[in-house]
Each structure stands twice: as structure tokens, then as C-alpha cells.
């Protein structure tokens, strides 16, 4: 019985090997046919598009390339399959060089704008690609070049930051950038529109200590900035609450009118840094009511705080409105 099983197993292996050989032969035939088809296909002529690089050099003295003309031209070409394959595999092309000074001398300008027809480049392009390739079309049809005079000016810097403080902490001073002014250089038409530069957006969470770091500036793409970074300083200190009593003043009152307020003072609570706590007094604030806002239908006047130190945050004051009595002379 065992011998019979071994014979059957051996027979199956031989048959499998025969089948495998047939599969291998079939695959080889398919591969040969594919190669022959591919070689035959390459014998034909084809149309395709080649992306060809362009470089812009030598702007006239004191002038600047103010726009972004195309870095590549799309060339529609006809050629033999083998030729196209060879060029497709050649990933580096010598770029077409456009001399900006020559362009300004040979073309008319419309307020600094020059329109270069790409068909005027056909001969140069054809000589650079290959005599075996027939150039049919170049896209875009026109290269728009804008030249502008170079200008430098000094502009202020603004910090673009968002800060969330830990409880009882706040700014000690205003957020600062150093230097506070930078020089921007670029096309005059662009530089003239820039009145300040902002830092890149930064967010800080749970802040409880002073932050100092370098931060980049945002500027138009065709410009350069010196320095390109500024030092951001966020001075932080612990804050606490302070209470002061203020007299309430009346503004816009006629000279022949006397007004009594009830009450005539208010209590103001403010948040102040520890470094300034002892320097704050009632003289730093002003509380007023406006006689001009008075109406017969209202028996009370609203109190407003018109003056306060910049480093102080008012948390509340009371009363927010007062009764009044008018006396005339």
C-alpha cells in the first residue's frame, strides 16, 4: 500500500513539473511578444509635451524682477519613439536663458511690463533640445515680465501673538520686539504698499514667566527684510487686586448749573502687577458722568472711567450709576 502511495506522489510531482515548464515557456513567449511590441511601437512617430526650464538673468541696473514669470515652458513636440524615450529619460535640460537687459532694449514697455512672445524663442529651443525633435508649439504664448525700480525703506514691526496667562499672572510691560523697525527692500510698487511688518503668528498658553525668543517676519514674496528675524520679549509678573476711592466728576456742565451726585464717590477695583502696586493712586484714574447725556426720563447718570494707566486692568467699580440733583443759580 505504501509503495503505491509513493508511486502516485511521484507521478503527481512529474506532472506538476511538466505543467510548470509549460507555464514558464508561456510566460517567456509573452515577455518576448511584449518586448517586440514595445520596440515596434517605438519605431512610430509621436506627439508629446516636454516641460522645459527657463532662467531670467541680468536685470538692468537698479531694477528688479517684480513678478514671477513661468519657470518652465510646455513644449509640444513630434518625434520618433526612440528619440522621445531617450529625452524622457534625460531629466536635466540646459535652461533657456532670458537676458532681462536685452529684453528692455529690444521690446517696448508698458509701465515696466514687457511681453515676450515665446515663438521668438523657437529657434533657440530647437537648437538646445535635438535636431531629431520637431517643435510644434510653446505654451504659454506670452511671457509677462514686470521690472520695477529697487527701493528700500524702514518700517515698524508689530508682534502677532496670542497669550493666555495662568491665574494671577499678566503682562508686566507691553509686548516688545527688538529691533522695533526693520528695512524692507524690493520693487518700489510693492514696498510703497508696506506700512508695517508683522511677526509670524504665535500662541502661548498657561504663561507664568517672561518669554524671550527669536521670531520671523512676514513680508511680500518679492522683497527681502533685514534683519529677517526680531527678538520677541513678553515680560510677565504676578498680578493682584487693588482698591481705590475716586471722586466722580461732571463733564459738559453749563457754567450756571450746579449738580450734586449721590453718591459723589465710587470704589474701583483694578488688577495691577506687583511691581506697580505701590505706585497706583486715585490720581491715576478719572470717573465722570456726562451732563449732555441727561434726560428727563432718567433719574440716574451712568458713570464712566475715562482715564487709567495702560498697565492696569479694571475689574469692577461701584456704583455704575448715580442719582443727581440739579441746582441753578
Image (cartoon, rainbow, N blue to C red):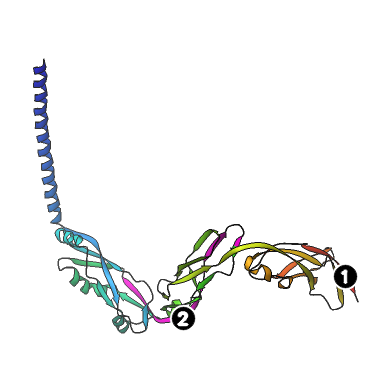
* Membership of 61 in magenta stretch: no
* Membership of 149 in magenta stretch: yes
Kindly report the secondary structure that dominates the magenta region of the rendered protein: strand
Q: Could you say which quadrant of the image residue 3 lies in?
A: top left
Query: Does 89 sit above or below residue 250?
Result: above
Q: Could you say which quadrant of the image residue 147 lies in?
A: bottom left
The image quadrant where one finds the N terminus is top left
The residue sitting at 13% across, 43% down in the picture is 30
The x, y position of residue 214, in whole percent, is: 45, 68
The residue sitting at 18% across, 72% down in the picture is 127
SS type, badge 2: strand
Mark 1 crowd level (few <14, some 14–19, many ≥20, 10 Å Cα)? few
The x, y position of residue 184, in whole percent, is: 44, 77
SS type, badge 1: strand
- Residues in magenta, as a range: 141-169
The x, y position of residue 318, in whole percent, is: 76, 61
- Furthest residue in direction top, as rendered: 1
291 on left or right of 71: right
Query: Does 165 sit above or below residue 189?
Result: above
Mark 2 crowd level (few <14, some 14–19, many ≥20, 10 Å Cα)? some
Q: Could you say which quadrant of the image residue 43 lies in?
A: bottom left
The x, y position of residue 220, in whole percent, is: 43, 72
- The residue at which mark 1 appears reads as 326
Of 84 and 14, which appears nearest the observer?
14
- The residue at which mark 2 appears reads as 153
The residue sitting at 29% across, 67% down in the picture is 72
Q: Earlier in the sequence, mark 1 or mark 2?
A: 2
Of 118 and 156, which appears nearest the observer?
156
Separation of disc 1 and disc 2 at Cα? Answer: 59 Å
301 on left or right of 89: right
Amino acid at each position: 500500500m505504501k509503495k503505491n502511495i509513493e508511486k502516485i506522489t511521484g507521478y503527481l510531482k512529474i506532472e506538476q513539473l511538466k505543467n510548470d515548464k509549460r507555464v514558464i515557456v508561456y510566460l517567456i513567449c509573452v515577455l518576448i511578444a511584449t518586448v517586440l511590441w514595445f520596440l515596434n511601437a517605438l519605431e512610430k512617430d509621436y506627439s508629446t509635451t516636454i516641460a522645459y526650464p527657463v532662467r531670467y538673468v541680468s536685470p538692468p541696473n537698479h531694477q528688479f524682477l517684480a513678478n514671477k514669470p513661468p519657470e518652465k515652458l510646455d513644449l509640444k513636440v513630434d518625434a520618433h519613439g526612440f528619440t522621445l524615450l531617450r529625452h524622457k529619460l534625460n531629466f536635466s535640460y540646459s535652461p533657456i536663458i532670458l537676458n532681462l537687459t536685452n529684453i528692455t532694449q529690444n521690446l517696448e514697455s508698458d509701465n515696466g511690463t514687457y511681453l515676450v512672445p515665446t515663438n521668438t524663442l523657437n529657434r533657440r529651443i530647437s537648437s538646445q533640445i535635438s535636431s531629431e525633435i520637431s517643435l510644434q508649439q510653446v505654451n504659454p504664448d506670452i511671457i509677462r515680465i514686470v521690472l520695477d525700480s529697487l527701493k528700500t525703506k524702514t518700517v515698524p514691526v508689530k508682534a502677532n501673538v496670542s497669550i493666555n496667562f495662568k491665574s494671577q499672572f499678566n503682562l508686566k510691560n507691553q509686548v516688545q520686539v527688538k529691533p522695533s523697525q526693520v528695512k524692507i527692500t524690493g520693487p518700489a510698487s510693492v514696498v510703497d504698499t508696506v506700512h508695517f511688518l508683522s511677526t509670524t503668528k504665535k500662541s502661548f498658553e498657561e504663561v507664568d514667566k517672561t518669554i524671550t525668543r527669536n521670531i520671523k517676519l512676514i513680508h511680500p514674496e518679492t522683497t527681502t527684510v533685514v534683519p529677517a528675524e526680531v527678538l520677541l520679549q513678553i515680560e510677565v509678573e504676578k498680578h493682584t487686586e487693588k482698591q481705590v476711592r475716586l471722586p466722580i466728576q461732571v463733564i459738559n456742565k453749563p457754567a450756571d448749573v450746579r449738580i450734586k451726585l449721590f453718591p459723589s464717590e465710587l470704589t474701583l477695583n483694578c488688577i495691577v502687577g506687583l511691581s506697580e502696586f505701590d505706585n497706583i493712586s486715585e490720581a491715576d484714574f478719572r470717573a465722570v458722568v456726562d451732563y449732555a447725556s441727561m434726560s428727563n426720563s432718567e433719574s440716574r447718570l451712568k458713570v464712566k472711567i475715562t482715564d487709567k494707566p495702560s498697565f492696569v486692568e479694571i475689574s469692577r467699580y461701584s456704583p455704575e450709576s448715580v442719582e443727581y440733583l440739579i441746582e441753578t443759580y
